[in-house]
Amino acid sequence: LGPVFLCCLGLGGLRRADAAVTFADLDDVPPLTSLADGFKVSLVRPPDEPANSGSKMLINASSALLLEPEELKVLDNYDEIFEKYSMFCNGRWLGAQILQDSQDLMYLQHITYMRKPDAIIETGTYKGGLTYFFATLLDWIALERSGGVPADEVATAGRVLSVDTHHPDLVFAAHW
């Protein structure tokens, strides 16, 4: 038997073992009823479990609600440093500069995959890294839908409309 996952119902589940439902495999966890529900679930190490034990609790609450005040301060400090040193300029997606935090990209990927949109409109494109990111995701979604037929051969592949008020020559002249 692999790691044990606990699905706790509500915040009280962190402290009340009787409120937990145990799953031997994440595949046994009931499917979410909405995209929003996907952001209300957190995978957390049980309170008395040693680090790297492999055991996790699946909590029916956003991780933002579970953080202690000092943990929230750590996140705020990270965000301040991230902005202060323009760390967003260092991101790349398959070689293209992308001006997003990697955690934000994970959430954007999750939303895109769950919604499987036909089109995405991106404003403030800059050098197109996020456009490329979304186009890649939509190609992968089309590949999955088609059972392996390449996205350029599938009529159902999503599209990304990229809009920016700056001329591309001005944008690419900025060497961040």
Image (cartoon, grey):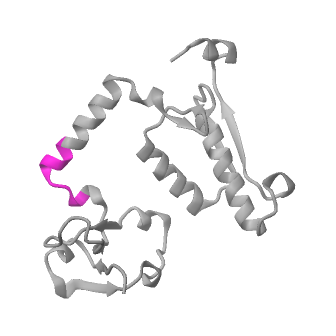
Residue 165 picture location, percent across and down? 63, 21
Q: Nearer the viewer, residue 9 or 96?
A: 96
Q: Is residue 28 above or below residue 120?
A: below
Whether 106 is drawn above or below 102: the answer is below
Confirm whether residue 92 shows in the render: yes
Picture coordinates of residue 63, whole percent (x, y)? 29, 59
Residue 49 location, quadrant: bottom left
Tell me the quarter of the image containing the N terminus: bottom left
Classify residue 18 as left or right of residue 96: left
- Dominant secondary structure of the magenta stretch? helix
Residue plotted at (24% across, 68% down): 45
Question: Front-most of 78 and 125?
Answer: 78
Image quadrant in which you'd find residue 38: bottom left
Residue at point 83%, 58% (across, down):
154
The residue lying toward the viewer, choosing from 79 and 2, is 2
Q: Looking at the picture, how far across and down is residue 87, in whole percent?
A: 39, 28
Q: Is residue 118 visible?
A: no
Which segment did they paint magenta? Answer: 65-73
Total number of numbered discs in the rendering: 0
Task: Judge from the rendering whether residue 12 lies leftward or rightward of residue 107; answer left or right.
Answer: left
